[in-house]
Image (cartoon, rainbow, N blue to C red):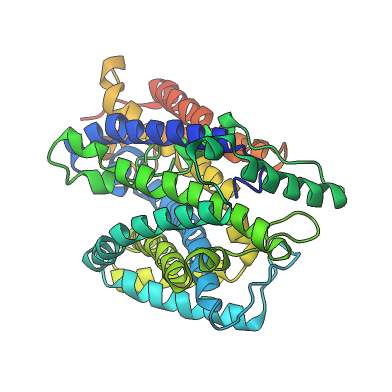
Amino acid sequence: LFLAAGASLQDLILGLLLGNLLAVLTWRYLVTPIAIAKRLTLYYQLERIAGGSLVKFYNVVSGLLFCFLAGAMITVSATAIGVPFNIAFDVPQAMLGLSNPAFTLLVVLVGGVIAAVAAGGYERVARVANIAAPWMIVVFAACGVVSLAQLEVSSFASLWEGTFWTDAIAFVRDKEAAAGKPPTVFGFGQIVIFAWLCNGAMHFGMADLTIFRFARNPASGWAPAIGMFLGHYMAWIAAGLLLAALIKLQPAATLNATGEVTANPGLLAYGALGWTGIACVVIAGWTTANPTIYRAGLAFQGVLPRSSPVVMTLFAGAVATIAGAFPNLSAKLLGFVGTYGTVLGPMGAVIFVDFYLMRKFGLRDEYALHSRISTNSAVLIAWLLPVVVGLYLIFVQGVFAAYAVIPCWFACGTLYLLLSKFMQRPTT
């Protein structure tokens, strides 16, 4: 996706390095101290601040967004499984168009299996991840090495010069020009912001309070560095190298007439590592969709507390599978992760302000708990106003989605503090 968006190799290497570092620092210094001090899940902590009714609304929103993210990963896994069975990954023109019937059926089967594993609970989800993660890291590295060999890159100097990369971008540009499309440019700043905020809902949005509440000391906040650098950093660079190699070896299989990438992840990995590449893509999609469906199930269970966790997780899996049946949703992943960070991230500012600033300004922290209200209007207004503005900028003005996350976060925190000053009443 980065190569197809016109990012230079140097910008990608340095931008991902800085962006992932910022993400790790955010987990370490923003999320972990609050998680250790409170030892509460995100949802329970929000309930004490915002009220039960508002948190149920938030749960519905977050659950649906998690399902769409999981759906994109189900699509990724299905593309790999389809390669040995010659099941084509056809991307329709319409945003909500389905692929061919065989691929749609494959998505349903993959989604069903992933949902069943997620419904087994946290231990089963963690067991799958612990088995798969070390092996995937090795395979991602192998994909990059094999792709460099296919691109005839034999020295660090030729790698840094990046002629093979600029040639691939030129190929994409030619396709775009032939279709009358303006060239896309994904610069250093965009890469940094994307890498930092693609998990904005988890760190700025405080979703990972649920995980870090088990941390024994603040040093546990450095743990995401493994996923960021051995996962995101290496995998994203390897994916770009895979596409560059396929453009060189099979240009007709990579892009359509309008310059959009048609080569699916399974085909890219198969071209480099054969069956091992297919297995890696399947498991990579699986290990992302699995915990995401589990999270969505927890969110939906928060709306219906008496419901079975298994039933809610299977429901989340069904929604994710339906989303995965629409290929264009996964194709919009770069924009989607910024959008869901824009929507969910600002609630983390409410938690931050409530923890650090409310008492310093003479205000009651955890106001919904102490006032016994079901909806804290200050939280509702402070959350929705920045989000509405952010979504307007994204979908109407065309602003890169990840750019809206931090402004919305600060706006929400500031509004929450100011509105609380005027709206809070004395509590016992």
Q: Position of residue 238 (x, y in %)?
A: 49, 51
Determine the residue positioned at 39% across, 72% down.
Answer: 114
Residue 285, by quadrant, is: bottom left
Q: Position of residue 62 (x, y in %)?
A: 45, 52
Q: Is residue 110 above or below residue 68?
A: below
Residue 79, by quadrant, is: bottom right
Residue 422 appears left or right of 71: left
- 316 or 140, which lies in front? 140
Q: Position of residue 188 (x, y in %)?
A: 57, 30
Q: How many marks?
A: 0
Determine the residue positioned at 52% across, 60% down.
Answer: 68
Q: Position of residue 276 (x, y in %)?
A: 42, 70
Determine the residue positioned at 66% across, 36% down.
Answer: 399
- 228 or 277, which lies in front? 277
- 243 or 401, which lies in front? 243
Q: Is residue 177 above or below residue 381?
A: below
